[in-house]
Amino acid sequence: MSSREQMLARIRAATADLAAGPEVPRDYRPAGSGPVPGDEALVRRFAERAGDYQATVRRCSAAEAAQVIADTAAGRGAARIGVPPGFPAGWSALLPGAVSDDPPLDLAALDALDGAVTTCAVAIAETGTIVLDAGPGQGRRAFTLVPDYHLAVVAAGQVVAAVPDAVAALDPGRPLTWISGPSATSDIELRRVEGVHGPRTLDIVIVSP
C-alpha cells in the first residue's frame, strides 16, 4: 500500500462514524424564469448596472445607431477605431478612422489604435455584464484587450435577465470574455488601478428596434 493509500485509509477510518452532513439546497434560479430577452425593464436595469461599473451607457434607435456610435467614439477623442470582421457596416459607416482587423492586426498595430468597437453575444441585466464569444462583429480576444478603449454595441434583444439565462444562451465551447465595466484591480494596497487587464474605458451603446 502506498503512503497516499495509507493516509486515505486512516481518514476513512477516523470519519467512519460521523453522520452525513446537511443536505445542501440547490434551488438556483433556472434559466427562463425571468422576463423575456429585450424586455424594456431588463434593458433599463442593464443600463443602470453597467453604469454602476463605471461604463458609460447610451441608448438609441436603429436609425440613430451609426451617428451615436460615431459621436461616442469622437467624444473619447478616438480617431482610429478598430472594426472586427462581421461588424454591421451600417453601424460603422460614420466612424471617420475605421481600421479593419481583417487581416488581423499585429499587437503593435492593436496597441496603436485609439480603441475598438464590437458587438456582443449577450448582455446580462442583473450584473451589467456583456459577454463576447468571438462571433461575428466581436473580434478575437486580443482585439478587445489590447486597445485602451472599448465601444460595445448591444442590441436590446440580447439583454437577458440573469447569469443562468446567459449561460443557457452561450456555447461553452467558444472563447468567452465576460466584461463588467472597464478593466480594474485593487489587488495592490487596495488602490484601484484601471487598464491593467484590458481597456480602462468602456462605452456601451444599446440599440433598440
Image: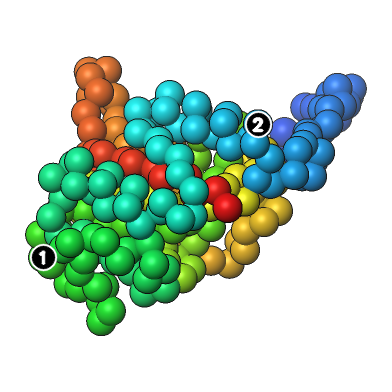
Q: Quadrant of residue 189?
A: top left
Residue at the location (50% across, 28% down)? 49
Front-lying residue, 103 or 117: 117
Q: Element type at marker 2?
A: helix
Q: Quadrant of residue 8?
A: top right
Residue at the location (62% across, 63% down)? 171
- The residue beneath circle 1 is 108
Q: Earlier in the sequence, mark 2 or mark 1?
A: 2
Q: Please provide percent x and percent y for residue 167.
A: 65, 51
Could you tell me which quadrant the N terminus lies in?
bottom right
Q: Is residue 82 left or right of residue 156?
A: left
Q: Is residue 110 left or right of residue 1?
A: left
Vertical order, 133 against 147 (above or below): below
Vertical order, 141 against 163 (above or below): below
Q: Which mark is residue 38?
A: none
Q: Please provide percent x and percent y for residue 147.
A: 21, 53
Q: Quadrant of residue 25?
A: top right
- The residue beneath circle 2 is 41
Q: Please provide percent x and percent y for residue 9.
A: 74, 41
**Which amino acid type is marked by label 2?**
Ala
**Which amino acid type is marked by label 1?**
Ala
Front-lying residue, 192 or 112: 112
Point out the frontmost of discs 2 and 1.
Answer: 2
The Cα atoms of the two marked residues, 2 and 1, are separated by 42 Å
Q: Is residue 197 left or right of residue 180?
A: left
